[in-house]
Image (spheres, grey):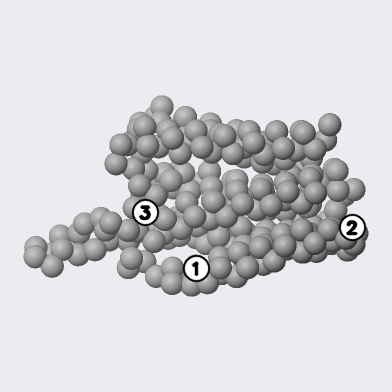
Amino acid sequence: MPNALTALLFFLSFIFIVLYVVFKFKVNKEFSFARNFPFEANNSGSAIRVSFLLVLLSSLCSIFFYLNVYNNSFQNSYVFIAMLSCFLISVLFLMLNLVNLVNLRLHFILFSLFAAIVTAESIDLGFHAINAYKIDGVNWLFILFAVIHFVKALFELILVSPLFKFSFLMEINVDDGTMKRPKFIRLAFYEWLYLLFFILNGFLLLLTSLV
């Protein structure tokens, strides 16, 4: 049953991401979404391989999830664009796991692309939900999904506006002038937050395909 396969693929993708996060906390007991980047806690070759494998498995399940929805939507162009976005988002998140802050500019560029494509996907799936309503003509849940996508996209655009500077990464200790890690690093937190937005996009698409 296509709908069952769609749900299964999304569920597997979500489970692999959950395992990825659990692994981060297992490797580093003090790991925090507020101050640690996705690439952190990869403190050994084996940790890097496990993190990479879990993200890769989640990415593959996500891509096949979008592909399955695409095939069941009679070659819907909005879902095709979302599927391409999913592929790019997955690649960028893999790279965010590998590129650390030694190359800050490259890391920031990767995140900027990651956030931009997640936002674009939100808008695209909003139009997909509207298109589904036009075809169905009855179920107002499609309009609700579209509104959620568009409001979320606006929120995503507003969030990234303060990030176009590098000064937020570290704080200076006023007593001795040394650098220290702050309790909250906006860029690190946003990398996790936009991953959550990407997951929400998939979940809303799943609901749209099942209604």
Q: Earlier in the sequence, mark 2 or mark 1?
A: 2
137 relative position to 50: left or right: right
* Residue occupying the far left of the picture: 175
Q: Nearer the viewer, residue 78 or 129?
A: 129
Labels 3 & 2 near each other (Cβ < 8 A):
no
Residue 27: percent from left, percent from top: 35, 33
Identify which residue is drawn at 28% across, 56% down.
Answer: 183
Identify which residue is drawn at 13% across, 67% down.
Answer: 174
> Height in image: 196 above or below 154?
above
Image mark for residue 136:
2
Residue 123: percent from left, percent from top: 69, 64
Of the residues tagged 3 and 2, which is closer to the observer?
2
109 relative position to 47: left or right: right
**Residue that label 3 marks:** 34
Residue 90: percent from left, percent from top: 60, 46
**Residue that label 1 marks:** 159
Quarter-of-image position of residue 4: top right
Residue 128: percent from left, percent from top: 79, 59
Q: Nearer the viewer, residue 46 or 106?
A: 46
SS state under label 1: helix
